[in-house]
Image (tube, rainbow, N blue to C red):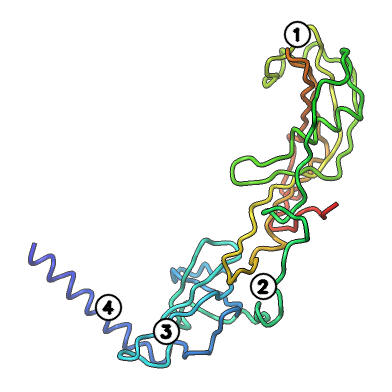
Amino acid sequence: MKRITSVIVALSIALTHAASGQDTEQRYKTGQIKVGDRIVADPLGINRPDTCTVISTREMPDSYKRGYTESYGIRCDHKPWDSVIATDKYVKLAGQPNAVASGAAAARPPAGANRFGTREPHTCANTKAPAGTRIDAAHAREYLLCQAEGVKGDFLYLVENLTLEVGAPDPMAVRERFGFSEIDMRVTPIAIRGSFQSYQCKPLDAQFDSRFYNLGKNCNVYDNRHAAGYCYKNTWGDWKCSMTDLNVNGDDRHFQVPPPSMR
């Protein structure tokens, strides 16, 4: 045990000496990089950098290296890193405007927006109309919106640019498909098809000096260009409507985009 402890201590001292021997030419001086600066950071030193915003600085102790920065607190565009050593091995200026000075970091979501920076999801007072065995396009559209939109897990889902048409009853649908919860077997499912954009939005992060660092890029959107599905009635008399595009490809997926406009 003593030998293992001695080896650990010796290794720690060696690493400290190696780092201190390189600090003079590599470490950034106080004020060279400021809060709000955009940097290219590679905290692990594995040549996988990300563009980040500096949200805090930690200075070296006066007794060790006065006037130099030890590390930066960061918020990155894609990776979950939260700090990086303040040397030119791990940090480069990104050549972008300071987020504080340019006002980019001080942006706010639109008035009336929720914590996702978006409008509220659609809701339905009830889903029991029409009372018969067929559903029209207006009701199918309303029910699809209020049943597809809402908070699920850590994300808010919204539907935009919805087009929808109602087809004929499909008696084979129950045998071919699953997911018809508590279906009323006396009412044949109705085929629907159309197109829409599905938004998946995460909450705005306001931990950067009370500013919203991911405002305008906190959503992913998926283009469902050739969506198809069904409306069916359950045993409680409620209509359920959903459709999806099973052939969404890479060109139909867009990441870090703004939420749909408030309206």
Q: Residue at x 92, y 24 (%)?
A: 136
Q: Earlier in the sequence, mark 1 or mark 2?
A: 2
Contact check, label 1 and label 4, Cβ < 8 Å: no
Q: Residue at x 81, y 30 (%)?
A: 143
Counting the numbered discs, the total is: 4
Q: Is residue 177 above or below residue 60?
A: above
Contact check, label 4 and label 3, Cβ < 8 Å: no
Q: Amino acid at mark 4?
A: Leu
Q: Is residue 225 above or below residue 168?
A: below
Residue 68 percent coordinates (x, y): 42, 89
Quickly name the residue at label 2: 105
Contact check, label 1 and label 2, Cβ < 8 Å: no
The Cα–Cα distance between marks 4 and 3, rounded to whole angstroms, is 20 Å
Mark 4 vs mark 3: in front: 3
Q: Which mark is residue 15?
A: 4
Q: Is residue 231 above or below residue 8?
A: above
The Cα–Cα distance between marks 1 and 4, rounded to whole angstroms, is 72 Å
Q: Amino acid at mark 3?
A: Glu
Task: Assign a secondary structure to mark 2.
Answer: helix
Quickly name the residue at label 3: 59
The Cα–Cα distance between marks 2 and 3, rounded to whole angstroms, is 23 Å
Residue 70 percent coordinates (x, y): 41, 82
Q: Earlier in the sequence, mark 1 or mark 3?
A: 3
Name the residue nearer the viewer: 222 or 212.
Answer: 212
Q: Amino acid at mark 2?
A: Ala
The crowd level at tag 1 (other Cα within 10 Å; few <14, some 14-19, many 20+) is few
Q: Amino acid at mark 1?
A: Met
Task: Assign a secondary structure to mark 4.
Answer: helix
Q: Earlier in the sequence, mark 2 or mark 3?
A: 3
